[in-house]
Amino acid sequence: MPTYITTAEAAAKFDISVGRVVQLCAAGAVPGAQKFGESWQVPATWKWTPLKPGPKPKVKRSKKSARR
């Protein structure tokens, strides 16, 4: 039987918020996560790797005429 930790323990371990851990569990991004009642349990062997932000999109802005 795998060992589980709480979402608060996982959040402290990876320096992210508890809400983010719950979001990841609900989205299925945590393999082996189980919901017991109203709380999530995360496998102790889970390794979280944050997504790296990509390049920002270029936004074309229109020039507005000078207001008088």
Image (cartoon, helix red, strand yellow):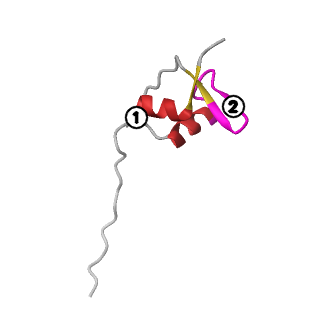
Can see residue 50? no
Q: Specify the farthest residue to the top.
A: 1
| Residue 45, percent from left and from top | 52, 16
Identity, as a three-letter code, of the amino acid under mark 2? Lys
The residues colored magenta run 26-40
Point 35% across, 56% down: residue: 60
Can see residue 42? yes
Alpha carbons under labels 2 and 1: distance apart: 22 Å
Q: Quadrant of residue 66?
A: bottom left
Q: In which quadrant of the rendered image does the C terminus lie? A: bottom left
| Residue 21, percent from left and from top | 53, 35
Q: Which is more toward the observer, 49 or 36?
A: 36
Q: Is residue 34 magenta?
A: yes
Q: Which is more toward the observer, 51 or 66?
A: 51
Above or below, 44 relative to 67 = above
Q: Is residue 28 magenta?
A: yes
Label drawn at residue 29? none
Identity, as a three-letter code, of the amino acid under mark 1? Asp
| Residue 56, percent from left and from top | 35, 44
Point 52% across, 35% down: residue: 8
Residue picked out by circle 2: 35
Label drawn at residue 15? 1
Q: Which is more toward the observer, 60 or 40?
A: 40
Q: In which quadrant of the rendered image does the N terminus lie? A: top right
Point 47% across, 34% down: residue: 11
Point 53% across, 43% down: residue: 19
What element does badge 2 sit on?
Answer: strand
Above or below, 66 relative to 59 = below
Q: Specify the farthest residue to the bottom.
A: 68
